[in-house]
Image: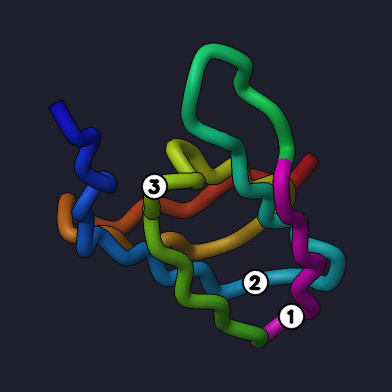
Amino acid sequence: MEKKPVQNTDYVVIKANEDGVNVIGLTRGTDTRFHHSEKLDQGEVMIAQFTEHTSAIKIRGNASILTSYGEITSDKK
């Protein structure tokens, strides 16, 4: 049986409320690993998507996060 890629159109919008917000993509599979990271400065916006490679997104620093489930604000370090 052929394995089909994960089809997911969930997007996450991240707006940095301070300089130095870290956005880290985590891999899907048996071993969860970091596969991508970005640093955002205050006012910068990043739109991320969950894919066949990305199963989780970690946000470090003060940011507003908008998802299809609602909006949340992460706290400062």
Residue found at x 74% / y 80%: 42
Could you tell me the amino acid type at mark 2?
Ala
Q: Label 3 to label 2, Cα distance in Å?
A: 26 Å
Residue found at x 22% / y 55%: 8
Q: Which residues are magenta?
A: 35-43
According to the picture, the residue beneath numbered tag 2 turns out to be: 16
* Above or below, 24 relative to 3: below
Q: Which badge, 1 or 2, comes first in the chain's sequence?
A: 2
> Which element type, helix, strand or loop, lies under badge 3?
loop
> Which element type, helix, strand or loop, lies under badge 1?
loop
Q: Mark 3, residues whose alpha carbon is within 10 Å: few (<14), some, or many (≥20)?
A: some
> Which element type, helix, strand or loop, lies under badge 2?
strand
- Residue 77 location, x and y as percent? 79, 40
Is 19 displayed left or right of 17 in the figure? right
According to the picture, the residue beneath numbered tag 3 turns out to be: 52
Are the residues flagged by discs 1 and 2 in contact, CB closer than 8 Å?
yes
* Above or below, 50 relative to 34: below
Q: Mark 1, residues whose alpha carbon is within 10 Å: few (<14), some, or many (≥20)?
A: some
* Above or below, 54 relative to 49: above
